[in-house]
Amino acid sequence: MGTINELTALQKSSNVYMFNVAMHIAGVTYKPHGSLPADQNDLLKMRNYYSQFGLGVKTGIDLPQESAGMQTTPKTVGGLILDLAIGQYDTYTPLQMAQYISVIANGGYRVQPRIVTSIHKPGKKASWVRRLNIGNLKYSIRLIIQRVI
């Protein structure tokens, strides 16, 4: 595939790109056959980014017994951070995945899911809508959606 940017990485679902992102977060320079000295702080940093999209945290839906998914705390992190980078370590609920996709589709707005009980005319922005603060996310998301669809 050659050198790619974040848009192409999402379009092609590039694991290698995501591995490089994880290593960058961990401050690791790739060395063939070298170790990967990632630690708990690196794992927590990645999980924090994911939680901003609604992954690994309760969505706040108005239903009882909502799950936050499953996360484990390993004694050593190392290469597990690469598994986390491609979605192969923690588990998420279908509702969290829907919320994650909705953040992308909504231009970076994370909306708390609700059970529809009535429909109203449009008004001012609801209090349960939050705008993520992740740099140039809105521009990147628009480009991703335009190129993927």
Image (cartoon, helix red, strand yellow):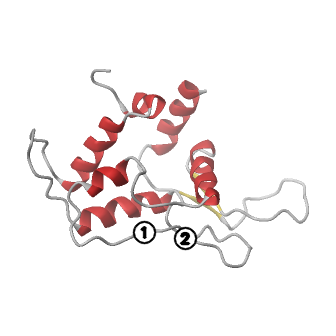
Q: Identify the element where label 2 is drawn.
A: loop
Q: Identify the element where label 1 is drawn.
A: loop
Q: Which residue is mark 1?
A: 71
Q: Relative to 62, is 138 above or below?
A: above
Amino acid tagged 2: Ala
Q: Name the one closer to the observer, 95 or 5.
A: 95
Q: Is residue 63 left or right of residue 16?
A: right
Q: Relative to 61, is 83 above or below?
A: above
Q: Name the one closer to the observer, 21 or 80.
A: 80
Q: Is residue 108 left or right of residue 111?
A: left
Mark 2, other Cα within 10 Å: few <14 / some 14–19 / many ≥20: some
Look at the image and tell me in which quarter the N terminus lies. Answer: top left
x, y percent for residue 73: 33, 72
Q: What residue is drawn where x is 47% and y is 62%?
A: 51
Q: What residue is drawn where x is 47% and y is 37%?
A: 140
x, y percent for residue 142: 55, 34
Q: What residue is drawn where x is 23% and y is 54%?
A: 79
Q: Is residue 111 left or right of residue 121?
A: left
Quarter of the image where one finds residue 113: bottom right
Q: CA distance from mark 1 to mark 2?
A: 9 Å
Q: Name the one closer to the observer, 122 or 149.
A: 149
x, y percent for residue 32: 10, 38
Q: What residue is drawn where x is 52% and y is 68%?
A: 57
Q: Name the one closer to the observer, 118 or 80.
A: 80
Q: Are marks 1 and 2 in contact (CB under 8 Å)?
A: yes
Amino acid tagged 1: Gln
Disc number for residue 97: none
Q: Which residue is mark 2?
A: 68
x, y percent for residue 76: 21, 67
